[in-house]
Amino acid sequence: MTDIPCFSISTGDGAYAIDDAQRIVFWNRAAQQLLGYSSSEILGRPCWQILAGCSRDGQRFCQPSCPVLAAINGGELVQSFDLIVNRRDGSQVAINVSSIVCSGLNTYNSPNDQQP
């Protein structure tokens, strides 16, 4: 995939890219290590279905009508935010999400691998 910036491939933070239909088209090694999904089992699947993110108070955030994409498409700047997401093994992890408009690239990190 040539339109993914090289920093997303080599960063220690988990990074993924989505297409216009919210399907994951890129999944880096750090994302695999943090969440337990290999790129081969993740590519082509909807990000909201995989991450199933919720706010700290349990409100569903990741969904087909993505509030981040709506904000970006509306020309708004999106500040980083915390999210609780599911790992492949069923456990959850708290991450901090930053969105970078670059063909749908999103990055997230969990500096202390915090448990929710």
Image: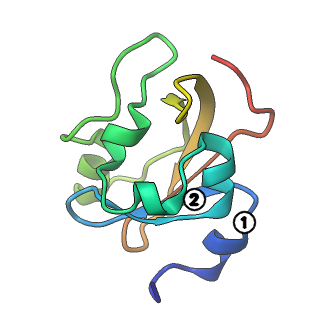
Report whether residue 105 is seen: no
Q: Going by the image, does 2 lie left or right of 97? A: left
Q: Going by the image, does 82 lie left or right of 47? A: right
Report whether residue 85 is seen: yes
Residue drawn at the location 75% of the way across and 32% of the way down: 113
In the rendered image, residue 110, in percent from the top left (x then y), is placed at 70, 39
Residue drawn at the location 22% of the way across and 65% of the way down: 20
Residue drawn at the location 56% of the way across and 80% of the way down: 5
Residue behind mark 2: 15
Q: Going by the image, does 76 lie left or right of 27? A: left
Residue drawn at the location 58% of the way across and 22% of the way down: 91
Which quadrant of the figure contains the N terminus? bottom left
Is residue 77 placed above or below 102 in the rendered structure? Answer: above
Residue extending farthest bottom: 2
Residue behind mark 1: 11
Is residue 22 placed above or below 68 in the rendered structure? Answer: below
